[in-house]
Amino acid sequence: MFKIKFCLKSSEIANNYIGDEGIENRKDQMRMKIGIPRGLFYYYYYPLWTKFFETLGAEVIVSGKTNKQIIDSGVQHTVDDACLPVKIYHGHVMDLKDKVDLIFVPKIMSIYKGEYICPKFCGLPEMIKSSLKDLPPIIDTTIDFHKSKKKLLKTVYEIGKYVTHDKNKIHFAFEQSLKQHKAYMDYMKKGILPTDIDGSKRLQCIHSCKNKKKILLLGHPYNIYDAYLSMNIIEKLRKNHLHVMTQDTFDTRIINEKAATMDKKMFWSFGRKVLGAALYAMEQKDIQGIIYLSSFGCGIDSVIADIIERRTRRNADKPFILLTLDEHTGEAGIDTRIEAFVDMIQWREKNENYISTHGKYVSTN
Amino acid sequence: MKITFPHMGNMYLPIKAMFDDLGVEVVVPPKNSKKTLEIGTKYSPELICLPMKINLGNYVESIEKGADTIVVTGSCGPCRFGYFAEVEKEILKDLGYDVEFVVLEAPDGDIKEFYNRISKIANTKNMIKIAKALKGGISVLKKIDKLEEQVLKLRPYEKNKGDIDKVYKKLISNLENITGAQKMLQLISQAQRDIEKIPLDYNRDVLKVGLVGEIYTIIEDFANIDIGKKLNELGVVVHKSHSTFRWLLEHLFYNSIGGTREKDIRKAAKPYVKTMVGGHGRETIGNTIIYAKEGYDGVIQVMPFTCMPEIVAMSLLPQVQNEHDIPVMTLIIDEMTGEAGYVTRLEAYVDLLRNRREKYKNEKMLSWR
């Protein structure tokens, strides 16, 4: 019932690609430059956001890929207790500071009915404004669909207003960007991860993978898809002949079904996704193991990862490993743990009938 | 059925009174101690916040004393508190304890389910009886919170050191040993009268400090290493921005009875935090500003390590501190917090406040405006 295509044909890619037909009114005037920091929700929504602003006629500038300098400037400007992704986000805003007219830092409170995002997202624009000085104006529209999505269009107009007052134009741009978003989501469902897709303006698959052994990599998109932060964990696993799946490659329906089996509704949108994917993966024979990539001090992960770990140990004979990142994490340590994990998976396959003196598989951690 | 619940300040007394009146057997968890925290830390996820670690310790200790049902309140906010019960269920299951959780939370339109839960723990379907017991419990809670507030306000003024504590401690131990709300109310009133008789010296130059931050670490004196008393001993009047009574109203009956103070807090916080950020993050900002306006000398933010809403508030506080001219100190607490280092910081902070006040006094005297 659920199959993954490992690679797309080039024709399919061409079909999914949506061109720049929206930008007609490129006049001689200086176009407004809108900066989008490459952090937090960027990895889920960049096709939507970039397409939206570009169709409206603005120029989108995405901050550079995460590097040491960005991390350092972020760490310097935030309170010590903020989590690494939030610190990095500050670094990305700093990176954009002098290059753009506006910076897009939406106040994302809730993207699904009855659910929330992490509290740090709710206070993000305020945190940015108070910790970073001399910033260009910030687009800090509140995105809150906790009660219903009725206000969706109003929110869209509010964001579009910064570029143009023409409501029809905003509406058109939003529809175009939704198409782009849909194509992006479809890519993810096919197993092509954001790290395999090129650029912020075009959706183009640059990489794909044909390994048969599957592994589930869980974690927030800003941890797992940021190549620098995650120390390229996806590529590392692929090099070890594993097909990497994430919570985003699963069917939404399956995730929702599985997440609904919890006694209490999971009220974090990320949490629900990750939990649903994990509960589903536990029952799948072809998924060999689960890796949870977390960042130090993440409040949501402290709850979710613990529940997933306990359930995996109790219900599934699969190895589980929790990797925690912070600004001091050394790559060698992570490499060693990944290697050990991969070894165990391969070793298990070879010795299928092996029963340890423990009576059970000895798992990591 | 033997009911237990987590500790939070003096809340165990009214809860006990309520269940006593209903005739339900209650196991009050042993007082929070190092052992409680050790048990909690051992079995909890590493990065979960301190409140859950202490709660879990409470449960394990109560279960070993025979409890089989745990009653807690819940929420659906972005703060982790709302999912505590789910994690605790998993942990206790792995530990091999067979207990039932009853989570009291404002139901999603499912009033019947809420009624079922209440009547289950109350052991009766008679709503009038439940309401009566609830009313008794709440009035005990209200009175005891008021008394605690008074103690924190008066202690720095007492002529003979230790007078107020003597009355207060005696009251608590008496309350632990009797049953029923009526008797408890009588005892509290008596203690209140006793405190009024204690000789005070109002000529002392005392400072005023407000406590803001995460509600559990503010109310539960074990978690905050008794910050109220420590500040009192340094000659500081303390006001806590949260009390169990207000929290209960907020949680069980939504915000409808919250009153004007809630509105004022939100209004004050608005220039810094537009919307709620979960937990009491917005209230932390709002309360700090209100304290500044009320002429407090300083504000201390108390929060558990990795508390998400408070981290948002914490990164906004430097701006509030500058714009409202009030010194704010943040104390982060986890199971590793040492008392000595903590006291040193409090002393240094109080010294700073005192110097600041002297400076202003001198400035006033010298100025010719």
Image (cartoon, rainbow, N blue to C red):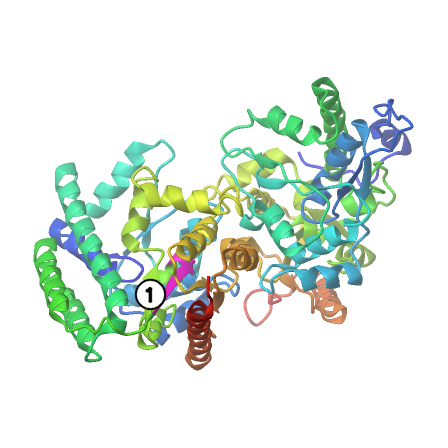
B117 horizontally vs A182: left or right: left
A225 versus A336 height, above or below: above
Residue B46 vs residue B232, the one in the foreground:
B232
Q: Secondary structure at mark 1?
A: strand
Residue B209 sits inside the magenta stretch = yes
Give x and y (percent) for residue A115. Answer: 52, 39
Q: Is residue A317 above or below residue B119?
A: below
Q: Residue A358, located in which quarter of the rendered image? A: bottom right
Q: Tell me the residue at 62%/29% (across/down).
A: A155
Q: Residue furthest front?
A: B368
B206 horizontally vs A169: left or right:
left
Q: Percent x, y for residue A195?
A: 79, 47
For mark 1, name the chain.
B
Q: Quadrant of residue A86?
A: bottom right
Image coordinates for residue B189, horizontal then vertical, percent: 11, 59
User: Can you see residue B180?
Assistant: yes
Q: Pointer 1: what residue?
A: B238
Write the residue at 41% across / 54% down.
Answer: B293
Q: Label the magenta part by its dominant secondary structure.
A: strand
Residue A308 shows in this picture: no
Write the start and end of the magenta stretch as one range. B207-215
Q: Determine whether, in the image, residue B120 is placed left or right of residue A261.
A: left
Residue B159 lies left or right of residue A123; in this view the side is: left
Question: Which residue of the protein is positioned furthest toward the top in this rendering?
Answer: A168
How many discs appear? 1
